[in-house]
Image (cartoon, helix red, strand yellow):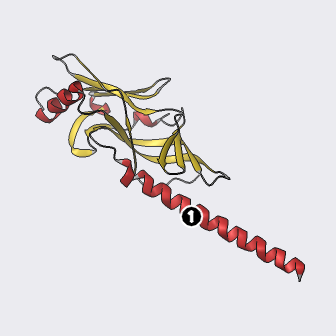
């Protein structure tokens, strides 16, 4: 698959944890491997175990609700640690106690008011399967990671789903054109 320059966002409910009031940390899995997610009716997506290979050395930020003005941490600054494990992409954010936005979020996560995780990325490689039952399945194999976010609401209905819908429509268009050509060939054989 060719590289697409469409920034994608995926959000999921996750188990966020807080630690240590003196040196506060928010941590959790920002992406989960091999779990099929239905983006919208009939369109499914999974993240391959190798999708983040090589991506964690890039300059990645931890944000609040994907807002680039609300930076919680950054891996290049040592305030965001990212790693993959058997479950998925795990992140640990050291919260700046002097940052009121960060501390307010820390307490919202601690209370259970904020429970969504998300990540922003470009798809560098994926497999796509269009099934006979009309459903489609995408397996994300490699990404360029820009950010992870602690989120109040899921973000991808406005981002990833739109991109996937365009892919599905293009596939349907190609399938219809192939069917038309096949019918023309059949007609030629009869005449």
Residue 184 drawn at (x, y percent)? 78, 77
Residue 163 drawn at (x, y percent)? 46, 56
Label 1: few (<14), some (14–19) or many (≥20) C-alpha neighbours in 10 Å = few
Q: Seen in the image, is 24 located left or right of residue 162?
A: left
| Number of numbered discs | 1
Q: Residue at x 77, y 70 (%)?
A: 182
Q: Establish if 47 lies above or below 127.
A: above
Is residue 182 in sight in this rendering? Answer: yes
Is residue 95 in sight in this rendering? Answer: no
Residue identifier under label 1? 170
Q: Residue at x 53, y 40 (%)?
A: 46
Task: Identify the secondary structure beneath mark 1.
Answer: helix
Q: Residue at x 85, y 80 (%)?
A: 188
Q: Seen in the image, is 76 located left or right of residue 46?
A: left
Pick the front one: 6 or 34: 34
Residue situated furthest right in the rendering:
190
Q: Establish if 86 lies above or below 6.
A: above
Q: Residue at x 83, y 78 (%)?
A: 187
Q: Seen in the image, is 162 located left or right of residue 153?
A: right
Residue 110 drawn at (x, y percent)? 22, 24
Pick the front one: 3 or 150: 150
Residue 6 sits in quarter: bottom left
Pick the front one: 81 or 46: 46
Query: Which quadrant, please, contains the C terminus?
Result: bottom right
Residue 83 sits in quarter: top left
Pick the front one: 165 or 76: 165
Residue 136 drawn at (x, y percent)? 58, 51
């Amino acid at each position: 698959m060719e590289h697409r320059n469409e920034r994608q966002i995926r959000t999921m409910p996750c188990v966020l944890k807080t630690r240590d009031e003196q040196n506060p940390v928010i941590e959790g899995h920002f992406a989960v491997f091999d779990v099929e997610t239905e983006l919208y009716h009939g369109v499914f997506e999974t993240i391959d175990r190798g999708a983040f290979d090589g991506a964690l050395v890039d300059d990645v930020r931890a944000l609040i609700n994907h807002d680039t003005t609300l930076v919680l941490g950054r891996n290049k600054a040592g305030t965001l640690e990212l790693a993959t494990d058997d479950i998925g992409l795990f992140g640990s954010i050291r919260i700046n106690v002097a940052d009121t936005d960060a501390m307010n979020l820390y307490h919202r996560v601690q209370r259970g008011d904020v429970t969504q995780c998300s990540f922003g990325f470009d798809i560098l490689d994926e497999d796509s399967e269009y099934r006979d039952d009309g459903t489609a399945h995408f397996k994300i194999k490699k990404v360029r990671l820009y950010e992870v976010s602690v989120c109040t609401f899921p973000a991808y209905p406005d981002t990833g789903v739109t991109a996937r819908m365009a892919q599905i429509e293009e596939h349907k268009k190609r399938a219809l054109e192939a069917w038309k050509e096949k019918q023309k060939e059949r007609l030629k054989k009869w005449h």
